[in-house]
Amino acid sequence: MILEHLVLGFLETNCYILGDSNNNEVIIIDPGDEPEKILKLINFKKFKVSKIIATHGHPDHIGGYAQIYKTFPIPLLINQEDALPFQVKETKNISQGDIINIGNLHLEVIHTPGHSPGSICLRGKDYLITGDTLFAGGIGRTDLPGGSMEKLFSSIQKKLFSLPEDLKVYPGHGDFSTLKDEKLYNPFFR
């Protein structure tokens, strides 16, 4: 498995390059800013980009997409509830339960509204990419348009905390964690 991690822009957004090491096919997750850094890594590693995904539509997670689209004219996979309000063009809708395939890797889409109406998480075999839904020791903010604390807590408790505790958590900002640690130590759930 390929898993590259870049911290991009003023808000230090985590961008992930995830893929199949057998054929170098990758997806870009949350190309928020500094697209030149993303493109440089892809070129250096000779990755083949097949998909681009946004965990939600806020600018710090999709801001670099327009520039990347010039090199890789691939529609952005995003939940439709976030594509329209944030006026993202060239999109393809992804919804709860969809499976995204990258070579031999499979990601399940989990719709987790709360931070934004169209927030999603992506579950792999032993990891969970949580965007701005769940952080190491925190949760996404809900004071932006479309945010809802009630929906965010419901998404985390009913959808994420029902998953295996040993899943690694790769959030949209900050350090990595595990679901077990977030259940035990995240101050929002104690």
Image: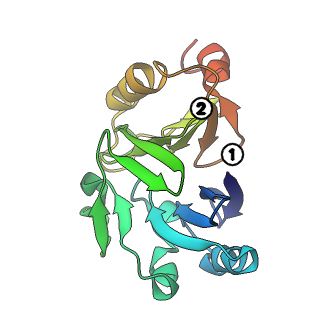
What whole-number distance in Å separates the C-alpha atoms at marks 1 and 2?
10 Å
Label at residue 174 = 1
> Is residue 80 found left or right of 126 in the rendered image?
left
Badge 2, how many Cα within 10 Å: few under 14, some, many 20+?
A: some
Q: In x, y percent, where is residue 187?
A: 61, 20
Q: In x, y percent, where is residue 40?
A: 70, 80
Q: In x, y percent, where is residue 112?
A: 37, 37
Q: Quadrant of residue 11?
A: bottom right
Q: In x, y percent, where is residue 104?
A: 54, 51
Badge 1, how many Cα within 10 Å: few under 14, some, many 20+?
A: some
Indicate the secondary structure of the residue bearing disc 2: strand
Asked if labels 2 and 1 touch by Cβ distance under 8 angstroms, the answer is yes
Q: Which residue is mark 2?
A: 138
> Is residue 163 found left or right of 57 in the rendered image?
right
The image shows residue 33, relative to residue 3, as above or below, that is below
Mark 2 belongs to which amino acid? Gly
Task: Give me the residue at 39% from left, 31% from top.
Answer: 152
Task: Give me the residue at 60% from left, 43% from top.
Answer: 171
Task: Report if residue 55 is visible in the image.
Answer: no
